[in-house]
Image: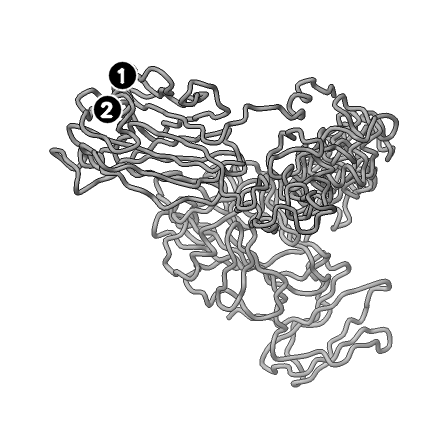
Amino acid sequence: MIRSIARLASLTPLMTLAPLAGQTVQIDFGRSDNQTAGNWNNVHGPNGQVLSTPSIALIDDQGDPTAYTLNTDFSSGGSWAGSGADYSGTKPAPFDTPPATATDDSLFIREPASTTFTLSGLDPSLVYEIACYGARGNNGGATQFTVTDETGTLPVQLVDNYQNATNVATFSELVPDTANEITVVVTGVFSENGSGSNTAQQSSGALNAIILTGSLPPDDDNDGMPNRYETENGTDPNDDGTVGETSPGAKDGPNGALGDFDSDGLTNLQEFLGQNSSGVSSGYGQTLSGTADSDSDNVNDGDEVDGALNVWDEFGFPDGPPGLPTDPHDSDSDDDTLTDGEEILTYNTDPNFGDSDLDDLPDAYEVANGLDPAVGTGDDGASGDPDMDNLVNSAELSIGTHPQDPDSDDDDLLDGDEVNVYISNPLLPDSDGDFLEDGDEVLVHLTDPLLIDTDSDGHRDNIEVLAGLDPDDELSLPAFAPVSWELDALTSTAQIINTGTSLYAQNFNGSETVVNGVTFAEMTVAGSVKASPEVQTTMASQANDSSIYNDAVPELSGLLETVWFNGGDPLKNNIAITGLTPGKTYVVQMARADDRDAGTIPGRWFFIDDLGGDTAVDPVGPTNTIYGGSTNPTILMTGTFTATSTVQGFSHGHNLSDGTYSGTQIPFIQVREAEAPAGFTISVLGFDAGAFQIQATGLDTGTQYQLVRSENLADGFPTIVDGPRLPAGTSDIFEDSSPPTEQGFYRLEEVLVTP
């Protein structure tokens, strides 16, 4: 980075013209053809037009230049009045002596328009009086004047301007604000005393002239500091420094001009005049004689304006102290988020320039990240790599990684490798949002950290990992437990199951909703993959559409009108749920609503696993469609399965009438442990003469039962080893006479007998 010479000009205090006490400035507002000659300032323009934002350097009534500037903002309204509105009658003082050209014509402002005038470059050691005159000859209303100075916005003054011979808005003892400015806003308003053929004409304001006068404020002890300044800063306005003087007549006591009441290295008068300790203007304006550190940056005002503690000179070399001064009103002179005190007293950096060592690494960045902001070479420079992650410091700054941490996101991949080799995000441990960290994908599973389904088999990488499969092999597919699905029209909240232990219930793209005592958590997911840690899909979109459901059951609307969905990619119809315990039986519920116009996209049939999807009558009749119209029922899908692993998957979507896949949409899901069936319990398990036996109690003697066996929990318990039969009583023993030699899983089932 190159230090610009322009920086020197911006930091070197500039001497300005010092207005004199009693100096008067006269400003004429009106048409270009009616300007006032002599020692008047003219703000003018063609009849009916305005200037955009004129800025005028003002002269005084002797024709001498001042330090004052008038900035005018016409953006809210205003134009130059025609000659028919001129008022040539008697004028009130002090506008009774100026030439008629200064007071007859005007700036025309009609309610609710307003024009803002800002007087800049004012002397903070003076107080000001502003006299405003407005008059119209043919019609008019009132002109509202609103003035703001250091003390705030003063009470509004109104001047009736129709043939105004008596009214002047005068604001006295005005104090320039911290920017050495005073603002005047001029607005036209309605007046009952106005004249005109309509309300608009009675709402016409005018500004003809302004007279600005600066004067010294009261100074009872004649020590050069106004009473107001002394009172505000805690010194005695009636003590010129006599009290506490070091010798008779020295007048260097703490309250006088030569005293240093706050012990900051500047006399009270130097602070009032905005000077450094040499008595030269600091360029930073007035400081507080009662506060040693006006900006609370831990560097006293005197040290700031003198540069007494700053080692950095105007050329950017640490050759001091003293160095360049800093702004005593700004705790961070170079706006680099390090205070001047921190830069000067702690970090030894340049408080006036944000990159002290010119290495293109901001001082604040280097400090925050353990680099030396005063050294621009080696590990501390732009080309350094102190964490040896194959990213130089300038790249880490640009990307947002930590230059002292080789693995900013703690995913076991170096930041440089993520950026340059794997093109993954070094700030996100899971770049693709598939719940596998990038390091695990690259180093353990050999999957792509930017793809949620590396082998494009329709199953997320992490689901394949949880299922113990190879996520980089498209032929390695999960073998989930079979699910027994029931499909019903959802017409009541009572159909939402609330028994059995809840694992989770989620409302996709919707807010938290309670239905039948079940709390469905808000699940809104940003980004292009819709998944939660518990429910994972490859769907890409979400929607909120009240037309999906006709509010037949209002309590269900919050569940059914927000969805996750995707278009016609058949590899995106798989849904996986996690957090399961192998061997436990679970119930999963989802729904599908679509009451949109049946004629929009007819003939799309939804499916769940192998059920439905191909004809108008399977599985629930001709209403099994999206865009089914207002009579289309909402379909509730309830599935029961016994988990064979910690994850379970199923597919859901809709097909076109020819069987081709067309999309997926789900509004909510809940997963619960299934309640144990009432009626019998297993009381004894064991072996007898090589046979495996269980004893059940609470049996129904009129119901048939069978004992079934599974080798691995994934085959759906295909082998019947005892039964079906009626029990010998309410308690009976069922056995497997030839149990497997390694492992087996058993289930005692009721058998439904079809008449």
| Residue 598, quarter of picture | top left
Tag 2 secondary structure: loop
Q: Is residue 165 above or below residue 676?
A: above
Camera-nearest residue between 709 and 396: 396
Camera-nearest residue between 423 and 674: 423
Pointer 1 with pointer 2, Cβ within 8 A: yes
| Residue 418, quarter of picture | top right
Amino acid type at circle 1 is Asn
Crowd around label 1: few <14 · some 14–19 · many ≥20 (10 Å): many
User: What residue does disc 2 label?
Assistant: 104
Residue at 30% across, 39% down: 144
Camera-nearest residue between 163 and 51: 163
Residue 716, horizontal then vertical, whole percent: 68, 59
User: What residue does disc 1 label?
Assistant: 34
Tag 1 secondary structure: helix
Q: How is the image coloured?
A: one colour
